[in-house]
């Protein structure tokens, strides 16, 4: 008995748990979350220079009372 083509067959890589390759559904890369797109969180930039890291560690040590070198 020949099998009929399944009209509900998913494209390769797609399953009931995934849209396939990528993090967003096809065609919704720039859509708002309310429209089915992906949420892109935002945060202010962080200074990761050695001087800024050292200053932040010193401030944290003073704030928590753990001492340490700054």
Image (spheres, rainbow, N blue to C red):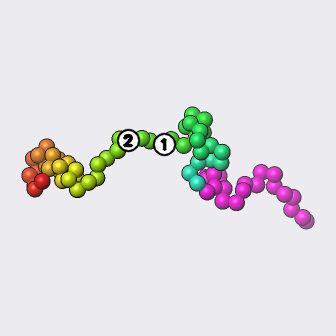
Q: Which mark is residue 32?
A: none
State the separation of the CA atoms marked 1 and 2. Answer: 10 Å
In the image, what residue occupies the spot 54% across and 43% down?
Answer: 38
Q: Secondary structure at mark 1?
A: loop
Q: Secondary structure at mark 2?
A: loop
**12, 51: nearer the viewer:** 51
In the image, what residue occupies the spot 20% across and 53% down?
Answer: 51
**48, 68: nearer the viewer:** 48
Q: x, y (%) of residue 67?
A: 8, 52
**In the image, which residues are magenta?**
1-21
Task: Name the quadrant of the N terminus.
Answer: bottom right
Residue that mark 1 sits on: 40
Drawn side of residue 13 relative to residue 6, left or right: left
Drawn side of residue 51 relative to residue 10, left or right: left
**51, 56: nearer the viewer:** 51
In the image, what residue occupies the spot 72% across and 54% down?
Answer: 10
Residue that mark 2 sits on: 43
- Membership of 29 in magenta stretch: no
Q: x, y (%) of residue 35?
A: 60, 35
Whether pointer 1 and pointer 2 mark residues with C-beta atoms closer than 8 Å, the reply is no
Q: x, y (%) of residue 41?
A: 44, 41
Drawn side of residue 47 relative to residue 10, left or right: left
């Amino acid at each position: 008995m020949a099998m009929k083509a399944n009209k509900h067959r998913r494209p390769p890589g797609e399953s009931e748990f995934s849209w396939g390759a990528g993090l967003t559904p096809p065609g919704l890369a720039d859509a708002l979350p309310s429209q089915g797109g992906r949420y892109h969180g935002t945060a202010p930039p962080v200074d990761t220079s050695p001087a800024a890291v050292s200053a932040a560690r010193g401030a944290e040590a003073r704030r928590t009372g753990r001492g340490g070198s700054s």
